[in-house]
Image (cartoon, rainbow, N blue to C red):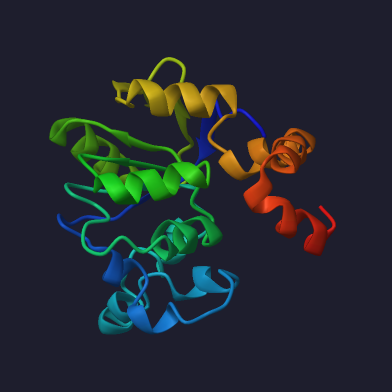
Amino acid sequence: MSAIRAVSGRALPLRGDDIDTDRIIPARFLVAVTFEGLGEHAFEDDRAALSGAHAFDRPEFRGASILLVNRNFGCGSSREHAPQALQRRGIRAIVGESFSEIFAGNALVLGLPCVTASYEVVEKLQSLAEAQPDIAFTLDLESETVTAGDLTASVALKGATRDALLAGTWDSTGALLARFDEVRAVAAKLPYVGGFQASTGR
C-alpha cells in the first residue's frame, strides 16, 4: 500500500459533458480475461471518428498524466474497465466538474484520484493546457489545490476518499494481503470455510 499525496505532470484537456464509460472503453473490449492492453483502446471509437484529432491522439498531449474533464464524467454503465483503461493509458489523476459516483469509486480502488472543481476553474485549466501543452501541473491532495505556472486553483475531494489516498488505505486488496495471516487465523475458526482451507492449503 502506498499513500498518494500529489500527482504531477502535463495535462490533457478533454472537453465535453456526459462522457460515458462506453465511450471511454467500448463494450467489445470487456471480454478480456485481464485488463492488460485496455489502455490502447481508450476512447477507440471517438478517436477513430475524429481521425487523429481526438485529444488522446494529439502529439502535444502524449505522455500527459492529468486528465481535465467536464460535467458528469464516467456516467453510464458501472464497468470498472473504464478507469482501468485510463490508468493504463498513463492517466494518474482526473480533475473535472463532476463524476459518476460509481466511476469515481472504481477509480479510487486503483489509486486514481478524481477531484472536482468549478466550471470556471476547469475552463481555465483546460484552456491553459491547450495553450501551453508543455506546462507542468501539480495536483496536491493534501492542500486540495492544483497549480500550473502562475495559476493556483482550489479543487475538492470527499473527506473519506482524501483520507484513504493520503493514508494509502485506498488499496483494499493490498490491505487484505498485508494481513493475510490474520485472515487465515479467522478462517481456521470458522467451520463453514474449513473445507476451503484444507483444499487450497491456505
Q: Quadrant of the N terminus?
A: top right
**Residue lying at 29% horizontally and 37% vertically, measured from the top left:** 125
Which residue is rendered at x = 49% and y = 45% of the image? Answer: 109
Name which quarter of the figure residue 57 lies in.
bottom left
Measuring from the top left, give residue 130's x and y in whole percent.
Answer: 31, 50
**Residue 64, image x, y percentages:** 49, 51
123 horizontally vs 28: left or right? left
Q: Position of residue 98 (x, y in %)?
A: 21, 41
Furthest-front residue in this view = 191
Q: Judge whether 146 appears above or below 47 on screen.
A: above
User: At 14% across and 36% down in the image, what residue appears?
Assistant: 119
Q: Nearer the viewer, residue 195 or 40?
A: 195
- Report how many numbered discs are placed on residues in the image: 0
**Quick check: 87 left or right of 106?**
right
Toward which corner of the image does residue 185 lie, by quadrant?
Answer: top right
Q: Residue furthest top?
A: 143
Residue 23 seen from this side = yes
Quarter-of-image position of residue 147: top left
For residue 39, above or below residue 126 = below
Residue at (77% x, 54% y) in the render: 197
Against 199, residue 127 (above or below) is above
Q: Is residue 178 left or right of residue 159?
A: right
Left or right, residue 98 beside residue 68: left
Give residue 144's position: percent from left, percent from top. 38, 20
Q: Nearer the viewer, residue 168 or 128?
A: 168
Q: In this orientation, does residue 133 appear? A: no
